[in-house]
């Protein structure tokens, strides 16, 4: 991964912290939650209020939907952006929404705080360049057939345009396993931390496509040191126009957030203890960030050292 | 030519019809002041005769006759209600009209081409009031208005300090990605410069913000937008692509309501204009009078008048019913050249 001039991590490099309307990704643990698609104003605002109450720090919601079938619901477009804007004014939550067309980048940027580039567009290089030029924070999802190197090179496209506000997001890859929608690759958390300076979030909703797996995978992601999660929540999942099987109800989300917080608290206390011992002279692994979210990279390593495993 | 093209044409014509009907009602309302009674049978008969005589083939005299009877009945009913008329510079949907609606929602807004037309029509009794912008937080003083204020005999009867919000407006259904340019007043374009640059929109100066909205609506332009306020979007049935697109927050304009007679009720603000002798300390001597009485000056503006001479505008808190204010005014009148109280009135901040 020698070409990652801006994305790559060299000894002594610290993690990038990205400030999004006061939410500091890379420093605090951030849960992005909201519906798969913006369907109506009522559905979006009710969901926004509920996820905020449960502890989410940003609101997601798709206005432009890349769908497998051209006949499936394609999103509300500009109207959807206006609804998200209203939800933001109501709750104060920064908005994360996907952009699928280079012509939309500046317009989506007028409404959203974070532009999401979806798995299917990960290697849409003109879209990446345009997103880079916008200067907006970017949530770059991993393509479903992409290697870590390909993924980080896509982040490099954005950074090369002078935009260093990139968060990457693992959302599962295609394997021979068909039980789950995708195979969620949590090993990317330490890998991204070791190879890059970018924060990494996990999307267990798309990563598994199965409701009951969202919580265990979220806990595992936290334990592995993820910087945040992106979770789909809908006020009435059975009536959702997309992804009805993987969206949590606000109550389910709230219950899960409580259990995630318990783990975050435990890890935070643990990190504080470690930092305390380090201060007393015990060695701390190089590159370990001290603070509330503790489990981080174990320092840079040669990614090809165990390629023959 | 497709059905869609034809319907677009029809929509264009409807937009113009609506504006024309509105204009006709405004003229009818103004005509009321010149007539002894609302009803004027010979005039109505003459109008009907002319309309039915010149009716074209498709819309026969039976139809146009009925339509005009209805229009004139509505005009009579407006004359009977006789809302107060307020002149403003610009097209319907101008920021002055937005401020006017905040001052009195039931007033009839009368568009004028120039600021001087507003003052002249109020002076001549054609309009009951006028509303004019006097200063903007980003653009500074409105030169033509201040120049007229130096010599006018009209009184300031109210002030409205209003936020200015610019919106990008387009014909409903237009794909925002197809928009290449934006028309508006050059000051509004300047205030949205970075928004326009971010979205690669070419700035096209136009004589008026609301006029740009009206032009887009009437011509059904699909490749271009206008920058104007929300109210303009409402009256010209345009879609707000994005609101609050101005680069800097805190864009406010202060508007004055002018009339022939002074405000009847005591207000919270006074305005005056004067000039001074060309000698050291002349201006200080006058301002000192207000300082001594503990009166807070809220605006001091000097505007070039005759060569080498400046008109000095001051606004201050208080009412002329207050003895301290009355005393300061009397002293200032004696000390300054041509000290004239423009009005004591209620100022509202929106």
Image (cartoon, rainbow, N blue to C red):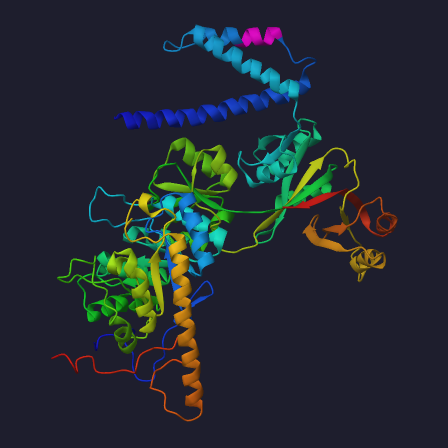
Q: Nearer the viewer, residue A20 or B90?
A: A20
The N terminus of chain A sits in image quarter: bottom left
Residue B174 visible, this orientation: yes
Going 47% across and 25% down the picture, which residue do you hit?
A: B18
Q: Main secondary structure of the magenta part?
A: helix
Percent coordinates x, y for residue A276 in the rendering: 45, 87
Going 79% across and 60% down the picture, which residue do you hit?
A: B284
Vertical order, B193 against A75 (above or below):
below
Q: Nearer the viewer, residue B198 or B122?
A: B198
Percent coordinates x, y for residue A207 in the rendering: 25, 60
Total marks placed: 0
Q: Does the segment drawn in magenta span residue B46?
A: yes
Going 54% across and 25% down the picture, which residue do you hit?
A: B23
The C terminus of chain A sits in image quarter: bottom left
Q: Nearer the viewer, residue A97 or B134?
A: A97
Q: Does the segment drawn in magenta span residue A27?
A: no
Is A57 positioned to the left or the right of B330 in the image?
Answer: left
Going 59% across and 19% down the picture, which residue do you hit?
A: B28
Residue B205 visible, this orientation: no
Percent coordinates x, y for residue B350 in the rendering: 63, 46
Query: Image quarter for residue B125?
Result: top right
Is A20 positioned to the left or the right of B273 in the image?
Answer: left
Q: Which residues are magenta?
A: B41-47
């Amino acid at each position: 991964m020698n070409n990652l001039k801006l994305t790559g991590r060299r000894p002594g490099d610290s993690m990038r912290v990205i400030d999004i309307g006061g939410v500091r990704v890379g420093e605090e643990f951030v849960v992005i939650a909201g519906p798969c698609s913006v369907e109506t104003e009522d559905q979006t605002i009710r969901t926004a209020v509920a996820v905020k109450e449960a502890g989410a720090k940003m609101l997601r919601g798709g206005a432009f939907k890349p769908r497998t079938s051209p006949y499936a619901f394609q999103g509300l477009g500009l109207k959807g952006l206006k609804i998200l804007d209203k939800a933001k004014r109501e709750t104060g939550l920064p908005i994360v929404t996907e952009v699928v067309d280079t012509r939309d980048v500046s317009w989506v940027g007028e409404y959203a705080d974070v532009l999401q580039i979806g798995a299917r567009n990960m290697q849409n290089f003109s879209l990446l360049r345009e997103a880079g030029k916008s200067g907006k924070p970017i949530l770059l999802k991993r393509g479903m057939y992409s290697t870590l190197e390909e993924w980080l090179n896509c982040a490099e496209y954005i950074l090369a345009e002078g935009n260093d506000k990139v968060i990457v997001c693992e959302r599962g890859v295609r394997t021979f396993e068909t039980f789950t929608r995708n195979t969620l690759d949590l090993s990317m958390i330490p890998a991204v931390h070791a190879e890059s300076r970018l924060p990494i979030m996990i999307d267990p909703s798309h990563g598994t496509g199965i409701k009951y797996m969202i919580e265990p995978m979220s806990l595992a992601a936290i334990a592995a040191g993820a910087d945040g999660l992106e979770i789909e929540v809908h006020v009435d999942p059975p009536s959702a126009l997309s992804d009805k099987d993987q969206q949590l109800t606000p109550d389910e989300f709230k219950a899960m957030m409580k259990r995630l917080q318990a783990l975050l608290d435990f890890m935070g206390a643990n990190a504080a203890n470690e930092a305390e011992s380090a201060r007393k002279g015990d060695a701390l692994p190089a590159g370990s960030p001290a603070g509330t979210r503790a489990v981080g990279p174990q320092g840079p390593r040669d990614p090809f050292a165990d390629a023959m495993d | 030519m497709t059905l869609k093209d034809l319907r677009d044409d029809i929509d264009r014509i409807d937009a113009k019809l609506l504006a024309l009907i509105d204009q006709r009602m405004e003229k009818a309302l103004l005509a009321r002041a010149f007539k002894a009674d609302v009803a004027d049978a010979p005039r109505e008969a003459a109008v009907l005769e002319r309309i039915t005589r010149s009716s074209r083939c498709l819309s026969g005299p039976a139809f146009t006759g009925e339509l005009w009877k209805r229009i004139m009945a509505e005009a009579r009913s407006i004359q009977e209600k006789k809302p107060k008329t307020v002149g403003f510079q610009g097209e319907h949907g101008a920021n002055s009209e937005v401020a006017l609606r905040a001052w009195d929602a039931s007033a009839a807004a009368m568009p004028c081409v120039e600021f001087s037309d507003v003052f002249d029509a109020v002076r001549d009794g054609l309009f009951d009031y006028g509303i004019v912008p006097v200063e903007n937080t980003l653009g500074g003083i409105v030169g033509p208005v201040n120049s007229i204020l130096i010599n006018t005999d009209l009184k300031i009867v109210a002030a409205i300090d209003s936020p200015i919000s610019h919106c990008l407006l387009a014909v409903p259904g237009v794909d925002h990605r197809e928009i290449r340019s934006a028309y508006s007043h050059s000051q509004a374009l300047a205030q949205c410069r970075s928004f326009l640059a971010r979205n690669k929109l070419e700035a096209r100066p136009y004589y008026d913000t609301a006029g740009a909205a009206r032009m887009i609506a009437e011509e059904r332009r699909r490749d271009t937008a206008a920058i104007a306020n929300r109210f303009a979007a409402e009256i010209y049935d345009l879609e707000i692509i994005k609101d609050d697109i101005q680069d800097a927050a805190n864009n406010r304009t202060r508007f004055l309501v002018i009339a022939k007679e002074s405000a009847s009720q005591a207000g919270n603000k006074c305005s005056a204009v004067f000039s001074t002798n060309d000698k050291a300390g002349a201006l200080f001597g006058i301002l000192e009078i207000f300082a001594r009485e503990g009166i807070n000056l809220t605006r001091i503006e000097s505007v070039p008048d005759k060569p080498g001479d400046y008109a000095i505008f001051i606004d201050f808190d208080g009412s002329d019913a207050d003895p301290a204010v009355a005393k300061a005014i009397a002293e200032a009148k004696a000390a300054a050249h041509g000290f004239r109280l423009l009005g004591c009135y209620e100022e509202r901040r929106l």
